[in-house]
Amino acid sequence: MKLLSLRLENFRQFENQVVLEFAHGPGRNVTVIHGANGSGKTALLNAFTWVLYGQFTDALENPDNLVNRRVLMRSPVGDFVNCAVELVFDHDETKYRLRRTRTVKRTDVPPYWELVGEDEHVLQFAASGGKWETADQADISDILGRVIPEKLLFYFFFDGERIGQLQRPDKREETASATALLTGDEVLALTARHLGDVAKRFEQHLKTIGDAETSALISEKQEIEEEMGSLGEGIQQHLVNIRGFEEGEKAISERLRELAETKHLQEERDMLRAREQDVTEDMRSLRDKVVNLVSEKGYLPLLKPAIDKSLGIIKELYESGKIPSDIKKPFVESLLQRQRCICDRPLTKGEPCYEAVEQWLRLSGMSSIEEKAISRRRDLQKAAREEQNFWQELNDLQSQRERRKTELFRIEERLNEIAETLRHAPQENIRELELALEQNRNALVHEAASKKSKQDKIEELRAKTEEINGEIQRREAISLEQELTKKRIAVCLEAKAVLEDVRELHRDVYRKDLSERINKIFKRMLFKEYTAVLDDDYRLEVQQDASAVPVGASTGENQLLSLAFIAGVIEQAQEVVSRANNMLAPNSSDFPLVMDSPFGQLDYNYRGAVADTLPSLANQVVFLFTEAQSDGVMQSLEKRIGREYVLSYASPKEGVQADYISCRGKTYELVKPARDGHEKTEILEVI
């Protein structure tokens, strides 16, 4: 999607018609819009989200009041007043014009308008010859979904108030959903779900045409699947509760970190919790290694008696001379034929020397037996060494587990000491916070355990459904139609299983890739030795490089983390969707980035780093910020700016002071008094 222009007609502060054109293309891909607080920056951002999907950001006040107040109040009572936003963009070598219009009727009572019908949403595209053709109303959502899916809207059009929140626990699902859409994971999930639905329809048909026992099996399976659905809903509720308790724990812990009396204890507890998690994970990993080791080599101790006995038999054969040394039969035969010993003594038939050499001839015929004995001894000795190594490796793993258990015990002891200290603190507010934290944590543990119990039950039921599927397929069909239906069910279920396996691998690969991209971008913008991590649960966090311990990131660092996530998503999406014949992700490698007040919480140096980084990652960037937020930014953006505007705001506030901004050597009005008591914003292009 390449933004070309945005036309506003009586929308919020923008009276009549105003037009913005956007920079695009290599080099000069940045559009900068300056504006004072309240001048319409947030309204501009929401003009994009409204025209695309009829949505608004949380930062927009009174989102229902879209019609320009000045135009509305000048209209006679009973008149119809329109406001509209029109967005022109290129996508996949086609030019589009998208327009959303709202009509209200002027009334004589507050808020002095009433809505008339639904918003009108029209999408046109340039056909051959340059003529505009109108898309069918039913196709608009599908077309826009291929341009920028609705779930991704606020990643590409977002406000600074929201930008620092993506690392919150309750944002994990949203974060996972964004990456799923861009990498095609959601397409795989929907396809697998659709195959499951098709299989169910075939099963229902088989139930009506099959024999009584087949119908009973299908009924049993349907009851199990209904129970699994109920359990799945319960798991989703547990997840919601868990996110809420995690957020509550985070808020209470943050409050304890802020109090001078508890700051050091809470920081120590944070480090202990992080280490506790690492140790627990280590113990889980060590347990898996023990299980794998025993599974792969646990047979060796059972074979030891047989190995020892076999080696003893071979040794006895050597010691008794039943297996000769390495004397080959042809060599002995040549000595007898020449009648000359290896020591050059004559060998005469019938004499003792001749008979001694002839005895070796008979023994040398056992060379094949000796070779097998040598080979078998080598294999047995190797097995004996592997058995010794098995016990050594097992002992090492068990020793490591014991050390982790000891460390975990000490961590838990210290955590209990900290909790006990805070529970009996002299300050009542500290005691209350610690009590709330303990209750919150107990509830969190309970929710996690309940979730795990339901997950285990679902796995048990899933295994049962697979048994029933097998039984249905094994039953002899009573008609050709029944046989065909069974085959269709089997094909659907097999394809669904394959897709789910592919999806799991696909999801893991792209999450790891995205985590690496986020960390690379984060380090590029940050001056500390921190690492950004997107873990298996799609939780964004900042860690110490060396220890991998989560750190209490500042507001600015959390904002950088969110920016790095968005930039990483864009970078990954550009690569994924630009691959030839990609059928899973949106069919464009161009993604715009429209950002309202992205630099507000950042230090001066970080602003420059962000301004350097984002335009090099996104195809097109639109920045909206105040003059104060532009400090440390404009110098970094100067060579990238292709279009620049100033929002000149007429304020109805009595006694408002005029304000100005200097751009490219010229002065522009940022704020000025409104002459008629109604706010109004003009858009001035900087030239």
Image: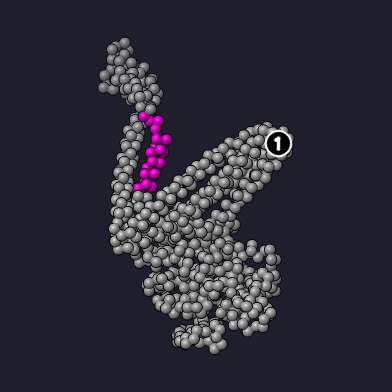
Residue 297, image x and y in percent? 39, 34
Residue 327 seen in render: no
Q: Is residue 227 above or below residue 561?
A: above
Most foreground residue, 48 or 254:
254
Q: Is residue 13 above or below residue 320?
A: below
Q: Residue furthest bottom?
A: 675
Viewed as shown, does residue 98 lie left or right of 347? right
* Main SS class of the magenta portion in the image: helix
Which quarter of the figure has residue 581? bottom right
Most foreground residue, 217 or 684:
217
User: Residue at position x 32%, y 48% from top?
Assistant: 412
Most foreground residue, 252 or 47:
252
User: Residue at position x 32%, y 54% from top?
Assistant: 423
Viewed as shown, does residue 472 lie left or right of 401? right
Q: Is residue 357 magenta?
A: no
Q: Is residue 293 magenta?
A: yes
Secondary structure under tag 1 reads loop
Q: Residues within 10 Å of mark 1 (few under 14, many from 20)?
A: many
User: Residue at position x 34%, y 60% from top?
Assistant: 429
Residue 644, image x and y in percent? 50, 80
Q: Which stretch appears magenta?
A: 278-301
According to the picture, the residue beneath numbered tag 1 turns out to be 210
Most foreground residue, 253 or 107:
107
**In the rendered structure, which amino acid carries the disc numbered 1?**
Gly
Q: Is residue 203 above or below residue 313?
A: below
Residue 96, image x and y in percent? 63, 71
Q: Is residue 677 above or below residue 254?
A: below
Question: How many marks overall?
Answer: 1
Is the N terminus in the top left, top right, bottom left or bottom right quadrant? bottom right
